[in-house]
Image (spheres, coloured by chain):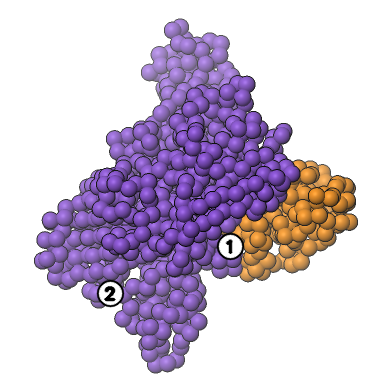
Amino acid sequence: MNDMTPTPEQRVEKLQGMGCRRKRVEDVRFTQGRGNYVDDMKLPGMLYGDFVRSSYAHARIKNIDASKAKALPGVIAVLTAADLAPLKLHWMPTLAGDVQMVLADGKVLFQNQEIAFVVANDRAVAADAAELVEVEYEELPPLVDPFKAMDPDAPVLREDLAGKTTGAHGARKHHNHIFEWEVGDREATDLAFRDAEVSIKELISYQRVHPSPLETCQCIASFDKVKGELTLWGTFQAPHVVRTVAAILSGIPEHKIHVISPDIGGGFGNKVGVYPGYVCSVVASIVTGKPVKWVEDRIENLSATSFARDYHMTTEIAATKAGKVTALRVHALADHGAFDACADPSKWPAGFFNIVTGSYDFPTAHCVVDGVYTNKAPGGVAYRCSFRVTEAAYCIERGMDILAAKLGMDPAELRLKNFVRREQFPYQSALGWEYDSGDYDTAMRQAMEKTGYTALRAEQKAKQDAFRRGETRELMGIGVSFFTEIVGAGPSKNCDILGIAMFDSCEIRIHPTGAAITRMGTKSQGQGHETTYAQIIATEIGIPADDIMVEEGNTDTAPYGLGTYGSRSTPVAGAAIATAARKVKAKAQMIAAYMMEVHHDDVEFDIDRFRVKGLPEKFKTMKEIAWAAYNSVPPGLEPGLEAVSYYDPPNMTYPFGAYICVMDIDVDTGVAKTRRFYALDDCGTRINPLIIEGQVHGGLTEAFAIAMGQEIAYDEIGNVKGASFMDYFLPTAVETPRWETDFTVTPSPHHPIGAKGVGESPNVGGVPAFSNAVNDAFAFLGNTHIQMPHDAWRVWQAARRLGA
Amino acid sequence: MAKTHVTMTVNGQSAEELVEPRTLLVHFLRETLGLTGTHIGCETSHCGACTVDFNGESVKSCTMFAVQAEGAQVLTIEGMANPDGTLHALQEGFREMHGLQCGFCTPGMIVRAYRLLQEIPNPTDDEIRMGISGNLCRCTGYQNIVAAIQFAAARLNTPAQQEQAA
């Protein structure tokens, strides 16, 4: 071996495989303004669509007069429900088993609902024409408060459902009721509460918010009348699902529909659903024979496409005096707006809300969710979380703090006392999940040690004493949160979207020179798949990540996949990559053995090559094997080196983490400053720490935004009050806290590479950490619960209420 | 609608076009000149995705008419690389420090940071945070953006770079 022979360490480094902080390949184009987002595309003869939207939350439409709009030079068409009705496209199915108006059919049910679609040869002309469409309304009483939705005299919102006592998820109790979802053991839970030594009960609300990625939802539809083919470019987190839905809705055969997601400027759940803008663009393109572009503006984005949360959770915990929890009972009232357009797996009307027992060993639990209609925008998407997991984590983590206060126990101590223990995994939760792996105790203790938790509590105590003596007007809050996520939807036994199982897929092709392309069923919106997916392959089959092109988003070339949301890319598609890579590797082993004239059992994989066992100097590199795959494969083996894998996960994955937030609150202004935020995440095997840290920073920032200020609020007559960045809080670099990240590693036992997913954990765990910090600051004054968002005005009000 | 004649210099090249008086500068750049690196995120001056450098100041090009740029020197992300084709220190810094994810705010953020580093060549973290507070990012939580700008500041302040710049 001469000096030029690379060492094993150098060979590993050259691969840039799993575990290294590989720089992102996407950044080369993005830092030079060479991304390719939907609105960057311009097709010859392209037309532009724009919506006429409702001024009212609830009104009957008496007349639509588009004559002035149609007379404007440059206007090609104005579509209304009457134009879509013959095609049966004036309504569309939602992912949640409901139907939704594409364009207002007789009435409007929320402010800014789509009424007419104007098509013009210029974006500004379309906007001008939309202003010229005259809509005559007859106002109806609006229903804004979800707690009044099922009053006997509540207005009837959905006249289309008259007489339907059963919905997609069972019986409907009222004309504004959507579903009741019940899980757990009611009897045993009631019994546990009857015998409880201590119990708490609190209404914990999680306000309506919006994912608001910086790029809004948009598409271009182009129908080729000669070929009968539709090409649809769009901001789709799940392009294959869009293709199937488009085929079902339009009647165009699925092989003649090409759905393409180019670069996407953030998604966070906003870009999973199918929106009226997509349907109208397709229809307009079919009608006009020209490409039609629709680009939502920010007001439309915030007020019409996909809110999140709006869960009102009556939370009860039973416990012993010593602080051992004995039962959990939750009733959640879910405000779904005018149509149930939740983006959950089809059989899960409340998503995975039954993860609400969290990280604690509850012997029994019972949970009911009631979904209701109101005169608000539809949605209910998973804003940077797995389905309804953020709501569940907020519910239990606030609940545990409230219990701790009642018991006079430290919140961290109460958690340590009730954790599912390491030896209990795989753990069967009282509400039906099998947690795959975890070591909660170690994570919590590491977080407490790194933050100096005991000293922080002592400092807080001293500040409280000083406050009582009138020496300071500042309070200190310490927010503890320990979350368990459930991600990676999901196993075909219980997860599907419109009947399609929630597997994911990967195709790997090794080219003769040893370079490779992989095509995926997922679609990055900033997660860096082009970088991390290649790292998995690099480690699995020994080809440098830099020699692997990752392609996503083109339904013609990618194998069918269910897309990217709910932190499912790594748990599901990441597993598909590993299994496809292992198929490639198995064939490479046969070829290598044949090249070296030994039996394939006598060769073994070594970083970037196969070598003869016991003879490390006798080897064939993957590059050599790739070449041989195209000219000298063993007899009986097909040429080429490629594989496809469709991965149906055996279980979900359960990432977890311990977060501690330290806040200083000025009681006279209500301004809460985050002094410190420590986040320990355990996402199993870590593929790229650089990207994991970035995901954690981003998720924490969104959690900060939600907890401390975001709200899509409505006034009493249903006017949306949070529909611009003036009114809806997106933190700038100035408000945003500094983040400290840390980790433990507990691999998933059922995942091929042990990875669990991380993108959404920080949002799930972050929101309760911030909210617990605010609540904790006031706990010594007798506070039990202050509702989010904790903006300065509300914190100031709470301080006044508590006599601070 | 009657069109107006407008001439400006964009990324060192002269641009001369007829535009509607109401055409926004961002639409002029993106649709007339095809420079799609400058993005539109809100159309209300809040998000800064449309930030360009305009006669030596950062401006939000969604809130300005193209005709107001008559005779102006405009720099967009497409003009950020060095004349020899190598990347600007900020472009390198954003990649090096993982200062971007979806990439949508990135062009505006880099163009803003370019001007910030001329205003304050050795900024503190707090000065950077204040200096980019007109640019929103939904993905990164800003921490790595601050680090990326510090990376570029350090790079630009080394003598070798200064020589190269001169």
What residue appears at the point 42 percent right and 62 percent down from the top-left corner? A142
Residue at the (74%, 57%) spot, across then down = B61
Whether residue A515 is visible to the viewer of this picture, yes or no, is: yes
**N-terminal of the two: label 2 or label 1?**
2
Query: Residue A241's x, y, as percent?
Result: 46, 35
In the image, what residue occupies the spot 24% across and 69% down?
A201
Q: Could you say which disc has been placed on residue A484 in the image?
A: none
As drawn, is A75 to the left or to the right of A445? right
Shown in purple, the chain is: A
3D distance between C-alphas at marks 2 and 1: 37 Å
- Which residue position holds label 2? A405
- Quarter containing the N terminus of chain A: top right
Considering depth in this image, is B103 or A535 the residue closer to the camera? B103
| SS at badge 1 | loop
User: Which residue is situated farthest in the front direction here?
Assistant: A62
Image quadrant occupied by the C terminus of chain A = bottom left
Chain B as rendered: colour? orange
Whether labels 2 and 1 share one chain: yes
Q: Position of residue B160 (x, y in %)?
A: 79, 54
